Image (cartoon, grey):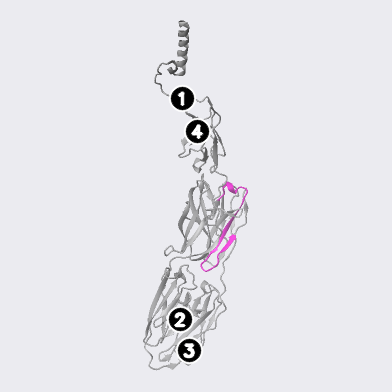
Amino acid sequence: MNATKKAWRGVALAVAIALGTTAALGAPAPAQAASTIAFAASSAPVISGSATAGSTLTVSTGSWTPAPTAFAFKWWSDGVAVSGATASTYAVRAADVGKQITVTITGSKAGYTALSRSSAATARVTGPASVAIPAPRVVFDDWMLDTVSGYHVYLSLDALPVEVDEPRYQLELDGSGTWQDIGGVGVGEIEAWATASPGDHLVSFRAVGTLAGRPVVGTPTPRVSHRARGYVQESTPTAVVSGSRITFAWDVREALNGWPEEGGIGYTITGDTDWTPGPAVGSVTVDVGYDKTVTFWMEFGGGADFSSWGEVTATTGHAPSATQLLTSTPAPSIIGTAKVGNILTARTSTWEPKPVTLSYQWNRNGNAIAGATDPTYTVVPADAGTQITISVTGAKAGFTSATKTSASTARVPQPIITGVAPTVSGVLKVGQMLTAKAGAWTPQPVTVTYQWKRNGVTIPGATATTYSLVGADKGATITVSTTGTKAGYPSLVKTSAGKKIA
């Protein structure tokens, strides 16, 4: 009996040792380190989704025995850990293009040894087939670029669809197809300035950048008309004294620097109590008497914050002792056709009694043209739509001066540029260079710019007289447009015949 009990006790002891406890046998248990158990089975994770910049990859954890209570994730790009990429999904970046993506998952469960498994690598990441960047929001601000005319704007995008390199905003003027960089792109508002000639332009904005070395062009905003302007410049009026009269003349169109000519222009003369509104180009004659000094002061521009001013002071001479009247004061006539670029000549008969000194003043719609005091006058673009006259003043010592004005010319027609479509030469094959030759333009000088197009769509940056054909041109029709511009003339666009690229 004792032998039997001893035998069973030995068996129990062996079992207790195997189970890691002897307390059930009444013996104290020795201290031991906590032990863990390995997972019985696990499978490698599997990545699903397109390995394309801008897309999202998802990992499947696979089958585990027993099932872990938690998984940790770590994504890799060509074996380099991606900072912050610790979720079960991964947004493929532009920086991943050309690389392979893997993921490591680590399963954990209480009492089990944590186990890490890595996926197979994806195919090498490619750039997206297309990236759609929305049109930015645009807010115009009238605070200017100092003396340079242009636009001050606030541009914003909520977000870019993918991680685009070199993101920036661009501006197009008057549908030219030429875009100029004006500032970086960011979430929230970006303040930007862009230069443009003074006056109204059709403007459009867009966001652009590169992705995997390829240009990415965003949707442009609709073209809207907005005035480009700068700080109003100074302008000094002129004064011409004739006896007891003074003629003050001014031309502030250039000084307005883009601000509208309508309103905001006026003048006062010494002794005036009221402000007199005036045009951008004009003159006024006042009879102040002899031996009088008066000051002509004018203000023009965009109100208190953006206006400028100019002044001139003049003094009349002494009164003549006694004067006689000229016996012959014939009205002048104008020889020539009133057309921009043509020369008009004043013709007058004999003034009596000889000799009589004649002076000339050309007028536009009855207002003196500043500086136009010769017997001849070259018609300029500013004369378009107006009528020209010539005033001749005869003066002789001891005689009262007299002024005679001619009949008006016909209205000066609006000038136009004429041009011939350009021609394109070269081998019509990818890798070859095409050369554009502009046609004849008149009246010279005319500034000609170039824009190459593919199937009628502007090719960004292709604004030279030559263009090297690229892969995207294969099978397309290539044209080149020339734009002729000349100060005071409406611009003109001429497009070549299309060339089909083999």
273 vs 121, left or right, is left
Q: Mark 2 highlights which residue?
A: 284
The type of residue carrying mark 3 is: Trp
Magenta span includes 1 = no
The type of residue carrying mark 4 is: Ala
60 vs 400, left or right, is right
Q: CA distance from mark 2 to mark 1?
A: 104 Å
Residue segment shown in magenta: 468-494
Instruction: Name the mark on residue 351.
Output: 3
Q: Mark 1 highlights which residue?
A: 36
Q: Mark 4 highlights which residue?
A: 70
Nearest-to-viewer mark from 2 and 1: 1
Nearest-to-viewer mark from 3 and 2: 2
Residue at image position (57%, 68%) is: 416
Residue at image position (42%, 79%) is: 268
Going from the N terminus, do you reach mark 1 or mark 4 first?
A: 1
Going from the N terminus, do you reach mark 4 or mark 3 first?
A: 4
Instruction: Name the mark on residue 376.
Output: none
